[in-house]
Image: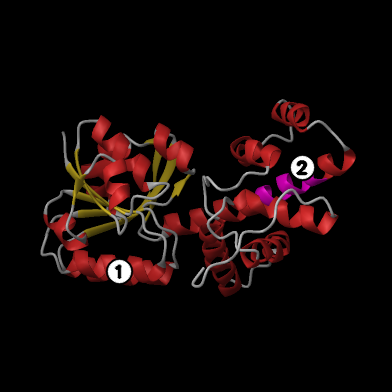
Amino acid sequence: MALTAGIIGLGNIGCGVAANLAAAGHHVIGYDLDPERITAASAEAGVDAADVAARTDLVVLAVATLPAWRATLAAISASGRRGLVVVDLCTFPIEEKVDAHDELARAGIDLLDCPVSGARPQALSGDLAMLVSGSEDAFARVQPALESFCRSVIHVGAFGESAKFKYILNLIISIHNMACAEAFLLARKAGVDLELMTEAVMQSAAYSKIFEVRAEKWITGDYDDPTAELAIQLKDKDVIRDFAAGLNCPTPMFDATMPYYIAAASQGRQKQDAASILAVLEHMAGIPRDEPPVAKDGD
């Protein structure tokens, strides 16, 4: 059954979600602070978050910052749209999510926590992997729509459980990203052909999805068209660190990667791909390929 679906946040993930929902026959209403993103997504423009919520059966939330997420959910709660299902793709602390879930429930709105694994290429191709937690009834109502932009959709339990899965997945991704960047650094220092090295890794036990997605960026040293922004990965790392600390769980390898992500941000690379941590290592090793971008106020 075709739904009217709202997408709030049309960045790297939201743009692909909107395109795939529309291709599956759903009517899509989009909202983003950047009007050009709405045009690029070929979505009907919503006036604001409350307007999108009031006119849709399903709202997919894909915003980047905690203040924007809080403000958006408050607007949705005030929209008066009882029976609405909100699919939250964002990675934020569980405590924040539980509070939002309870507030929306009082307004007659179902919030599902639905983090996804994947970046812009997977969002555009409908190849995201989604973990869902929350009301099974609400999930059943929107599952076909979710499957239009995900290759895998798994319900993992009560609300908040999927956030724990997401933290674990992102911990692994952060370590993989650092390990792959370090391997490219060694290859460059050793004078190895990077294209041949990439082919060898892709056919070996050293392969990972992160390596496949970011290899071209490490080969070229071009990080300005991000699949996943460094700023987003840094935000997620803070959430994961705090979650693990609350459980008194040591994360030595994850912790060891943190200074390199912070160093990349200090070079003004927040809007670049998270693969840009290789540039930090290259400067340390005396083989830089670029000058760090100039950080702007507020970055």
Q: What scheme was used to colour the molecule?
A: secondary structure
Residue closest to the eye, 297 or 134: 297
Q: Amino acid at mark 1?
A: Ala
Residue closest to the eye, 162 or 211: 211
Residue drawn at (60%, 37%), measured in percent from left and top?
A: 209
Whether residue 132 is visible, yes or no, is yes
Q: In the rendered image of this protein, does residue 23 appear above or below residue 231?
A: above
**Could you tell whether 248 is left or right of 14 in the image?**
right
Location of residue 125 in the rendering, given as x and y in whole percent from the top left corner: 41, 32
Location of residue 15 in the rendering, given as x and y in whole percent from the top left corner: 35, 44
Residue drawn at (41%, 72%), measured in percent from left and top?
A: 95
Q: In the rendered image of this protein, does residue 219 appear above or below residue 53?
A: above
**Could you tell whether 8 is left or right of 293 in the image?**
left
Q: In the rendered image of this protein, does residue 154 appear above or below residue 229?
A: above
Q: Secondary structure at mark 1?
A: helix
The residue at which mark 1 appears reads as 100
- Quadrant that contains the N terminus: top left
The residue at which mark 2 appears reads as 184
C-alpha distance separating marks 2 and 1: 42 Å
Q: Which residues are magenta?
A: 176-185
The mark closer to the camera, 2 or 1, is 2
**Residue 13 falls inside the magenta stretch:** no
Residue count near mark 1 (Cα–Cα under 10 Å), binned few <14, some 14–19, many ≥20? some
Main structural element of the magenta stretch: helix, strand or loop?
Answer: helix
Location of residue 247 in the rendering, given as x and y in whole percent from the top left corner: 58, 71
